[in-house]
Amino acid sequence: MTEIPKNHPRYESLLAREKVASGVKMGITSIQGLVAQGRGESFDYLIGERSTSSAVHAERAAVAALLLAKNPVISVNGNVAALAPDKVVDLADVTGAKLEVNLFHRTETRVHLIIEQLKANGAFEVLGKNPDVSLELPHDRRLVESRGIYSADVVLVPLEDGDRCEKLVEMGKTVITIDLNPLSRTSRKATISIVDNLTRALENMIKFGVEMKKEKKEELVKLITTYDNKEALFEAISEIQEHLKIMAAEIGY
Ligand code: PTJ
């Protein structure tokens, strides 16, 4: 991985880029993952590279849903494994969720390498190697484990594609997504859409998880029942508009 000087004004963004590129070199991330990261980066620029208040609101509701779930599962793909293997393992620990590797560009080698990467970051068990159920989907994201995503009541699917998100919602699950694009099909189809950068979102969620575990169950239920995803997406888009207005004013034309 190329060393990025810590005082570089775009340190976080360049570091993330290096992580995804080295994920590709290690065989963890798909080559298409580079394009996905670039797409995410451009939305992050428009958002202002911060966790907005609508994102924080969605992250709290998502953590409440994970903590109250009977069988919560976090789905891991090649970008997540490259960018935040430690954080995804920590979030699973804090919320009691299972981890399951689920890939769009599935190869058995990639599944194996991602499982090893998560274990190297402290995961005890990672599902995904032996899928025994096939969802009605025309691509490999259909392959899931009955103990994991198939029977989950709450699933966190970071950097997801719209049709599996829609299928999981159709199956009656609470689907939480992390996607910097508030206009994506995934964001519009999910139960709780977190419009934030994966790394920032996971860091916030781990912190909230530790705090919220001490809260009464009724407080967590309230966070979920008062959450409205359409409203949250509307807020996310408005926050981008506001940020762009500020940026335009700074040009000083
Ligand atoms: O590892 P695989 O084979 O399962 O493939 C994973 C990718 C990500 C390549 C695959 O799921 C894919 O092609 O995803 P998309 O359709 O490009 O969607 C990714 C979405 O995530 C886009 O809307 C991006 O804006 C968003 N995104 C990309 N990077 C980040 C992100 N959102 C949050 N944080 C990021 N770092």
Image: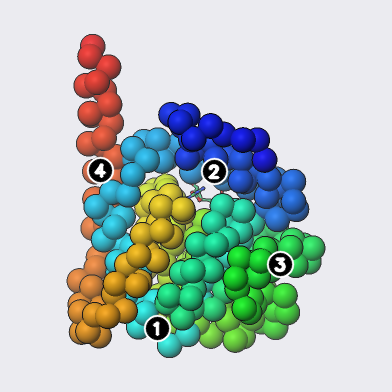
- What x and y, as percent, mark residue 130? 73, 79
Q: Nearer the viewer, mark 2 or mark 1?
A: 2
**Amino acid beneath label 3:** Glu
Q: Going by the image, does 251 lie left or right of 200?
A: left
Image marks 3 and 1: residues in contact by CB distance under 8 Å:
no
- What x and y, as percent, mark residue 70? 43, 88
Mark 1: secondary structure: loop
- What x and y, as percent, mark residue 44? 41, 41
Q: In which quadrant is the C terminus drawn?
A: top left
Mark 3: secondary structure: helix
**Amino acid beneath label 2:** Ala
Residue bearing the label numbered 1? 69
Residue bearing the label numbered 4? 239
Residue bearing the label numbered 2? 16
Rendered residue at 53%/69% (across/down): 89
Rendered residue at 22%/36% (across/down): 242
**Amino acid beneath label 4:** Glu
